[in-house]
Amino acid sequence: MPAYASSPSRSLQVAAQVACLHPPALPWLRTLPIAALIATILVLSGCNRGDSSASGDAAGTVADDGSIRHPLRGQIVKVDKERGTLLVDHEEIAGYMPAMVMEFEVGSGDLALATEGQRIRAELVETPGGEFRLEKIWMIDQVAEATVKTAADALRQDTTIRGRKVYREVGESLPDFALYDQNGDVVRAQRFRGKKVMVNFIYTRCPVATMCPAAVHQFTVVQEEARKAGIKNRELVSITMDPEFDTPGVLRESAEARAIDTSNYSFLTGPESAIKDLLTQLGVQAFFEGSILQHTLATLLIDEQGRIIHRADGSRWDVKDFVGKMSS
Ligand SMILES: [Cu+2]
């Protein structure tokens, strides 16, 4: 089973990273000798996926839409739900802005998760219109971060040790993980023991209606059918393939926009390495082509002991089939 880090997707991914700086230059880059390509990649390695391009000097990163982006660290002073803003006491951004207390617009999910006194890291966005927003907000929590990092490191090691047997077949167990849910809480794989769990991989910006949006919708149909059938002890989990963009706040905003009942349906995100390892071990391919994440789809059913008991590849699978297997 091909995996995330397999060579064809790897080279495309690298090409995509290069392409995000100078999209028109991609065909030209494909003709470069390997050594030149590697040199180009080393020079451009600060590139940040398809949604931002150009150089990352003291003037920040300039995205395609003309916005200027800087990493920011600070502490939330005030959450203003009415204005949809956070007042943040932020550190100096060298060459751009001194340390100051400043008001930023944020997304509705980030607003819902924000608490006064919380330390954050985020991306400051200055729009061409001169407005300031915060995106990619992560709460700084040393205990949570340590838990998530330890699990990600173990998963990394596990992926390496498994080598060519990295792909987990039906009958094997779900790998252990610790990720953040749409509330910013740490969720460990063990939380689902004693329950049947359906798992898939999605990303919120997916522009293909028949792919991720349909996969999420299909899960809500399973959720409803299982509820009607009186099936207890079941959960649904969608793990993002795009953790760079899909922060807890973004996942929350997306779930709320779709009016999803998150009482037993979680959206998870976390370190890029953990996501890659889960994709690899569960046999899902995902790589950026320009700003578009190309990917396959898989739907897994996990039993009460954490074993993979059923799998459907692609976007077409039968709700009744999974609901039936959940009730047995
Ligand atoms: Cu998709």
Image: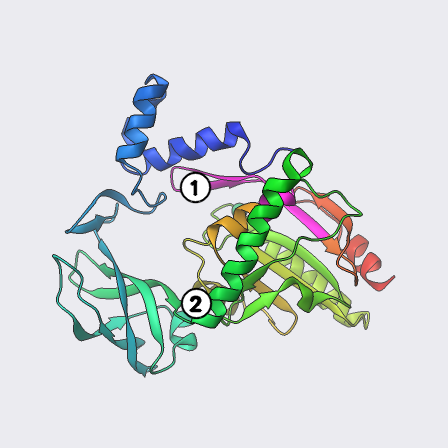
Question: Which quadrant of the view contains residue 193?
Answer: bottom right
Question: Is 222 on the left or on the right of 148, as rendered?
Answer: right
Q: Could you tell me which residue is drawn at 41 percent across and 55 percent down?
A: 245
Question: Is 113 on the left or on the right of 102, as rendered?
Answer: right
Residue 314, position in %: x, y?
A: 66, 41
The residue that mark 2 highlights is 249
Residue 293 against residue 22 in the figure, above or below:
below
Q: Is residue 205 visible?
A: yes
Residue 204, position in %: x, y?
A: 48, 55
Give, as a three-letter code, the residue at label 2: Gly
Quarter of the image with the N terminus is: top right
The residue that mark 1 highlights is 292
Queried whether the magenta region covers residue 281, the answer comes back as yes
Q: CA distance from mark 1 to mark 2?
A: 21 Å
Residue 147 against residue 294 in the figure, above or below:
below
Q: Could you tell me which residue is drawn at 39 percent across and 31 percent down?
A: 15
Look at the numbered disc 1 and give the secondary structure of its residue: strand
Q: Nearer the viewer, residue 60 or 212?
A: 60
> Residues in magenta?
278-300
